[in-house]
Image (cartoon, rainbow, N blue to C red):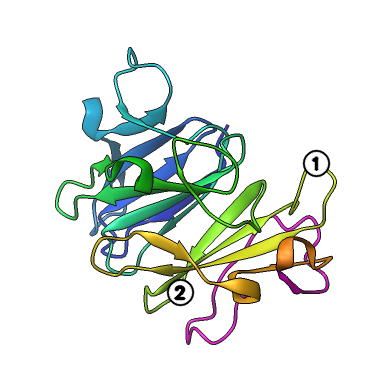
Amino acid sequence: RVQDMEMSPDGRHLYVATPYTIWTFARDTASGTLRRMRGRHGCIRHGSPRARCGLARAMSGIRGLAISPDGRHVYVAAQNSRSITILRRDPVTGRLRQGFRRRACVSQFRSPCRRTRGGFAYPEAVAVSPDGRNVYAASSTSVGLHGDGAVAVFSRNTRNGLLRQAHGMRGCLSDGGDEGCTPARGIAGATAITSAPDGRRVY
């Protein structure tokens, strides 16, 4: 079941997310035709080392993808893992890899990720600002199974792609003001998020 698709900024690769795997397709920029890449260059997945894909942590229940403007990193919202996972992208081959050990993902709940303060209990979608300096994650709930929706705010290291959640109330917004987040209206059950081209608004 396809959950999301994202095109690389250079138009050379299309990434298709299913619940546990991201598939890489090479794109002919003249005709637009797609060709699925083979072997470990063609997919990365959560779970079994027997799969003919690259392996990644904290990618169970993938719901959304976002690619940085420089094309060097892919951010994955994984609901079952309750995390945002960072993948490095080879701009030439399109291959995705995970690195950085614990810093390769952020979660407010569990290892093997770097723990953050909160605001994205069950992430549904992720977006990168046009200048590449921030990442936003939308969650359908903020705490537990029945909490209100939330948006988590991260600063992004433009050199290595790593994320750090903003401090205090600036680090998240929630429909009910839970977890010390900035109170916001109308985001309960949020399942999508995007940034305006000028970077001044997030919807």
Q: Residues within 10 Å of mark 2 (few under 14, many from 20)?
A: many
Residue 33 location, x and y as percent?
31, 47
Residue 176 location, x and y as percent?
84, 65
Residue 2 painted magenta: no
Residue 161 location, quadrant? bottom left
The residue mark sitting in front, 2 or 1, is: 1
The quarter of the rendered structure image containing the N terminus is: top right
Residue in view at x 73 percent, y 58 percent: 190
Amino acid type at circle 1 is Leu
Residue in view at x 64 percent, y 59 percent: 138
Q: Which mark, residue 129?
A: 2
Residue 38 visible at all: no
* Left or right, residue 22 beside residue 43: right
Residue wearing tag 1: 145
Residue in view at x 75 percent, y 49 percent: 143
Question: In terms of depth relative to the viewer, which is nearer, 90 or 116?
Answer: 116
Main secondary structure along the magenta-highlighted residues: loop
Region of the chain picked out in magenta, as a range: 181-203
Question: In terms of depth relative to the viewer, which is nearer, 68 or 58?
Answer: 58
The answer to the question of whether label 2 and label 1 lie on touching residues, with beta carbons closer than 8 A, is no
Question: In terms of depth relative to the viewer, which is nearer, 45 or 42?
Answer: 45
Residue in view at x 81 percent, y 60 percent: 188
The quarter of the rendered structure image containing the C terminus is: bottom right
